[in-house]
Amino acid sequence: MCGICCILHLCGREDIHDATVCKGGDVDRAAIYQSLQRRGPDAFASLQLDVASGVRVEATCAVLHLRGTVFGELCAADGGGSVSVSGGMPQPAMAAPSCSCPQTPCLSFLEWNGEVFGGALQLHPEISDTTAVLERLHQLEHSFAISLCDGFNETDNARYAAALTAAQTSFAESCVRFFESDIEGPYAFVYYAHSLRLFLFGRDPLGRRSLLLHVSAASPAKMEKGKSGALETNYVEIVISSVAGGHLKSSCMRGEAKGEGNKRGRGGSDNRAEKGDEDKDDEKNSAASLFSFSSGCCWQEIPNTGLFVIDVAASAQTSLVSHFPWSMAHSVHPLLRFQSQPQPNPGRGHLGINNENTAEECPAIIRCLLQEIGMLSLPLLQDPISFDVAMATRYLQSLWKAVGVRVKAENCGADPTRPIGVLFSGGIDCTVLAAITHYLLPVTTPIELINVAFGDAPELAPDRLATFRAFEQLLQLPTCLKEGNQETFCASGREWRLVLVDVPHNSNTSYIRSLLCPGNSIIDMSIGTALWHAAQGCGRMQRVFADAEIALRMRSRTRSYGRHKLYRVSTARTAGARELQGAIPTHSDADNEAKFAPLLEAIITELEAFNEEPSSPVLLSTLGKDHEASLRPVLCKYGYKKLGSYLNDASAAGVIAFARHDEAPSKAIRLVKQTDMAKVQRVAPAKWLVDDGESSPLGSCVDTYTCESRVLLLGMGADETLGGYVRHRRAFERRGVTGLAAELDRDFARLWKRNLGRDDRVVSDSGREGRYPYLDEEVLETLGSIAAEAYRRATDTTCATGTGSVEAEAALQEALAPVCCFSAEDGPPGVGDKKILRLCASMLGLGDVVRLQKRAIQFGSRVAQAHA
């Protein structure tokens, strides 16, 4: 991973008028370079070249060394270029090959910010992936440039221009095929092909690495006089960079701004969420409007729709940027690809647990875990439950592989004693990643669980409470597994480091705001702030060495976590839920005390969870989303169709009161009776995880600690790919499975623009690399194969029973059911959302984590309160 920046100075181009440019003056290079060096602390290099008439390039990169032990030159130049390098000699994020065309000095170079985790590109263990990508690109460049070195030269204007254009097009199309088929992993890059006179740049098809664009008019001092003596006015500066920078002038004047930014609704949803395919249309048009401003910002996220080319040949008459799209529709949600694309091969990523010929595909540790919970011998494809288990096992295997390639030592700096970090909210996504990491890493590698909380009482933030409980679950994981008499796993003495980052609400956020650019919404600020502080890894640390004794003590714990429902464990299908339903009175509707008891319980739970005053308001949206399972039975019992009617009656009975408009940001209620307010218990903060009956914390603790990990695992993509958002449930309830499919597809298609670029900028600013196993290509392909197989199973079953053709909606619901289910019977909150991941958590030996409900980081960490 590194930070890259490429600045092109173009003058005298007749096509410049096609671009919308910023008139705010020069970009602050110093600010950009400082941000790049924070991303890549191991080395910094810059390269300045005059690459063509009227074209000068400044290329800069900073490196975080994680892969490879043999290096070439970090930067190279020939024929009038200058190079400056500082730092050591880690993997070359910017490198230049040797040129085999004798007529042209080789000035080609690559700026690479990425990781090759799979695909057809072969990597030598001692050579960085940067070098491997560079060599392949240079081979492609040479194969198309060789014709330009034979038969004619640049003085044959017409013939040369036609041949050059054809070679450029063929090269770009070949690069599309290369990146699309041979590379699996996140990346953003800029490649200058000198012999073809073009700059090629782009992001991976999922957009997991940040790459921004800024186009500005030149300042008067930089404009040059033309032949007539007049100043050239079509001089522009194009900046392609991992991070944005401000202007040297005090304000940014935009020219010919097109389009408007979309206001983000509450809960992160777009105001246009009900308008079908508009977001997909935006994505398709994003390449054409690459130089148009949006959201009031002159920096733009470079789309992930393909590769882009800037032609710097003197004869160039084309548009400023040419777009070469991917050949496949990567923006389609993996669960829906079977509808329009060839169905994945069921064999890849499939676990044939009961098939002797394919049993070796299943890692031994997974087989041991399945054996321990009695799932190994379940029949496949017959019973719906066992089919779901089989599909979850298949998904677990692909996720296992994705985590494995991201945490093995040779991909993380080759030091097995350096910790691996997990950004840890205590939710199911990150806890599953932490558990898999535990099973994969040698005992010599510590695991850092990094949790962030905001405010004067961070110990009471929902994510902090969930983190302590999930940490207990991780400490209970087995440290030794055997298959027969053979030991397959041993990690007794595993070192866990729980890093608690406490941030006051009045912390300075101006620098974080600059990293978010072009993101500028409240939700961008909330999520970005939480991620930035977590990735910095500066806080308190509790160290625990896990062994059988610790696991036994954790299993026997009787400590109560109070009534903090924000630990978010679903009570669906449990004795507690049945007892609650059985406690609903059946005698008289006039018995208000019993009738409104569940409502009072929900309000008190909310107030306790946030350590609020007993008279504080509770939002109606919170009651509807977070307490649906406990309130739905009483609504049905008394014939209420809507929560609002129930609340109106409660208000009329004097049980609650509606808050005034100035007391809450939206509709809210509060307690009114002193007896009810007296039931609200303020919980004493817990600074550390403390064992039952002990006054001192578990393990050892330090109050000042900075994380040592250079690789961070993040759960990004789990909600989008597995149906984890509340809006997914709402879409199903309002518009059925077609509405759910549309919402899933919309969330996945805009993930690159709304989340991933922003997250990469704020996380990488720590000098650590964020890695997203849930967005691994093979993991997504596995989801596609699961949906396709479930769909085939539904249609085959219908045909076999002679009941005719299955309805389209019913078949689609069956296709999604192994992954997420939102029906009232089978998919209550904490059960149906991310259903497949909950099964995986159960297989891994995680307890209450299996039933954790979704809570967004901005609310769980309480950072949202700071930006309200």
Image (cartoon, helix red, strand yellow):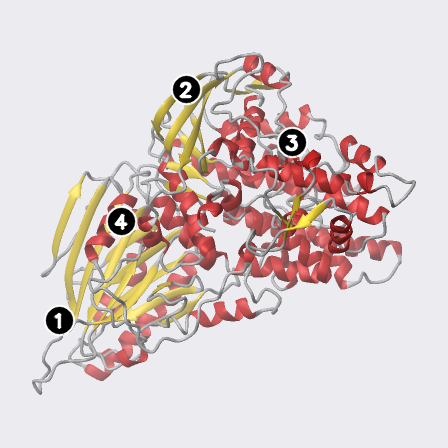
Q: Is residue 183 visible?
A: no
Q: Residues within 10 Å of mark 1 (few under 14, many from 20)?
A: some
Does 833 sit above or below residue 801?
A: above
Task: State which tag comes first along the sequence, 3 or 2.
Answer: 3
The residue that label 4 is drawn on is 35
Q: For this view, does 192 lie left or right of residue 554?
A: left
Total residue callouts = 4
861 and 615: which one is in front?
Answer: 615
Q: Residue at x 41, y 33 (%)?
A: 501
Look at label 3 and name its amino acid: Arg
Task: State which tag comes first along the sequence, 1 or 2.
Answer: 1
Of badges 3 and 2, the one in the foreground is: 3
- Mark 3–mark 1 Cα distance, whole angstroms, equals 65 Å
- Mark 1–mark 4 Cα distance, whole angstroms, equals 25 Å
Q: Residue at x 43, y 21 (%)?
A: 543
Judged from the image, the secondary structure of the residue bearing numbered disc 4 is helix
Numbered tag placed on residue 526 in the rendering: none
Of badges 2 and 4, the one in the foreground is: 2
Task: State which tag comes first along the sequence, 1 or 4.
Answer: 4
Q: Position of residue 452 (x, y in %)?
A: 45, 36
Q: Are marks 3 and 4 in contact (CB under 8 Å)?
A: no
The residue that label 3 is drawn on is 563
124 and 102: which one is in front?
Answer: 124
Numbered tag placed on residue 701 in the rendering: 2
- Mark 3–mark 4 Cα distance, whole angstroms, equals 43 Å
Q: Are marks 2 and 4 in contact (CB under 8 Å)?
A: no
The residue that label 1 is drawn on is 222
Q: Residues within 10 Å of mark 3 (few under 14, many from 20)?
A: some
